[in-house]
Every structure is written in structure tokens, then in C-alpha cells.
Image: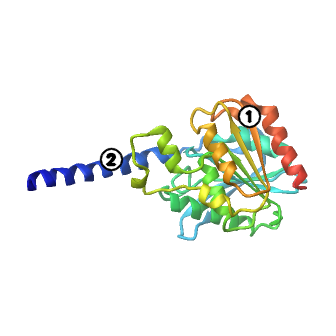
Amino acid sequence: MLKVFFLIVFAVLAFVFFVRYLEANSLFHPTREVPVTPASIGLDFDDIYFKTGDSLLLNGWFVKTPAARSTMLFFHGNAGNISHRMEKILMFAKLGLNVFIFDYRGYGKSKGKPNEAGIYKDGLAAYDYLLTRKDVDSSKIVCYGDSLGGVAAVDLATKRKCACLVIDSSFSSLADMTKTIFPFLPAFLLSSKMDSTAKVGGITIPKLFVHSVNDEIVPYALGRKLFAVAAEPKEFLEITGGHNTNHIDSRDVFLSGIKNFLRKLSLL
């Protein structure tokens, strides 16, 4: 009996280790090489280094757009780094926004290793950096979160004052995503929560949720679930196309939806 007991304990521990390993290798997919910069698409930018509350040095780009009234704080998704977001940087700059996009810890030229608590600290540091710039109106910071970045943007909005939130192709919680991707895994074993549903109901600034009905990575239903629990005022923009290409597949709808939302708030 004792042997059976130890075998069961070993099996349980091995399964927990497997879940944690799978979690660690599924959430974050950073790359270090930064092969291009905004200069490669004709944009002037400042190459910025700033420190987090736990003293890690992060890297970001501040793209200054002439006559911009507002600044977008851009939280990117879980793969690659800031150099893989050139199309969106250009789109948002052409809308008339300053754009500050930064790399989380462990991505691109940013130091450290990514984790849930860490990316929240990184978002706070990026926001606080913007407050040091004389060319940024602190009352007109648009927080934009793409996919995993939506989780960090929602968290930031519970701690700092944003003019509005734009949540693009994001999910309700990690537990919900786990049920979709790995339905055999018990969510309570995950060390990360990434539970935007527990936070977004208390955020009363204007919010725009953008999600594609064809999203093959983050199910449309999870975007709708997040929208459903969000506090007013809120809007939902339904688009089409793949998770990583919907801003191109639905370019006109995507841009006009964000533009109209920001104009109503006098941010453009």
C-alpha cells in the first residue's frame, strides 16, 4: 500500500510539473533580435530605455506624430517583439497619434524574463515614463492592448488613469483559454491567472473591444465574454480575419472603428 501511495504522489507531482512546464512554454514567446525600427518605414522615433519598479531596464520606441493630441501606449502580444508590429505602428501614427510601444521583460532589448506579475510592472513603468515627457498630455493617454497585451492594459487601467482602453483580440482569463486549448488541464493548477474578467468590471473609463469572428487563436466567444462583464461605457467592434492579420483583413473597418471611437472622446 505504501508503494502505491508513493507512486500516486509521484504521478501527481509529475503532472503538476508538466502543467507548469506547459504553462511556462505556452504563454510567452519572446524573440531578442530587433531587425528593423520605425525609421525603416519612414517614421521618426526616440529609442527609449527606462526602468521598472524592480530595477529592470526595458526598451521601447516613442514615435512622435506632428500635431498629435493623444498618445497611444501600445501593449503588444505574446510573441516576437516591438519590431514585429510595424504595420500597426504605422496605422496608428497615420491616425494622428503619438505611439509608445515597448517590449516586456525578456523581449527584444529588454532585460529579464517574462511572467504575469512582471508584465504588469512593465506596463506601470511604461505609463510612468510617459508622464516624464513634456510632449505627452497625461490626460490623453490611450491604452491599447493586443491579445495578451490586453491583459496587461486592463491591469494598468486599474492602477493608472487612462483616457480610454482599446482591447484588441484579447481573452477573458487564462483559465478560459486553457479550457479552449488544453481542455484536459485543470485550470486551478496554473500559477498564472490573467483574469481580466475580475478587473474590467471596475474600470469606468470608455472602452472599445475589437475581435474577429474568425479568430483562430483567441475564440470570439472569449472576447464577447470579456465585453459582457465590462463596466459601461463600452463598445464592441466586430471584424473578420485571422488573429494576427485581422487589422489587414478588415483594415477599413478596423481603422474607422478605432478612429470614430477616439474622435467621440476628442482624442483625435
Disc 2 marks a residue whose amino acid type is: Phe
Disc 1 marks a residue whose amino acid type is: Ile
Classify residue 128 by image quadrant.
bottom right
Q: Is any part of residue 247 visible from this angle?
A: yes
Q: Position of residue 154 (x, y in %)?
A: 65, 57
Where disc 2 sits, the SS reads helix
Where disc 1 sits, the SS reads strand
* Mark 1–mark 2 distance (CA, rounded to whole Å): 36 Å
From the image, tell me which residue sits under label 1: 239
Say which of 240 and 105 sits in front: 240
Say which of 144 and 33 sits in front: 144
**Residue found at x 57% / y 71%:** 53
Instruction: Determine whether, in the image, residue 176 is placed left or right of residue 84.
Output: left
Say which of 120 and 99 sits in front: 120
Instruction: Determine whether, in the image, residue 135 is placed left or right of residue 74.
Output: right
Can you say whether 249 is above or below 86 in the image?
Answer: above
Q: Is any part of residue 39 visible from this angle?
A: no
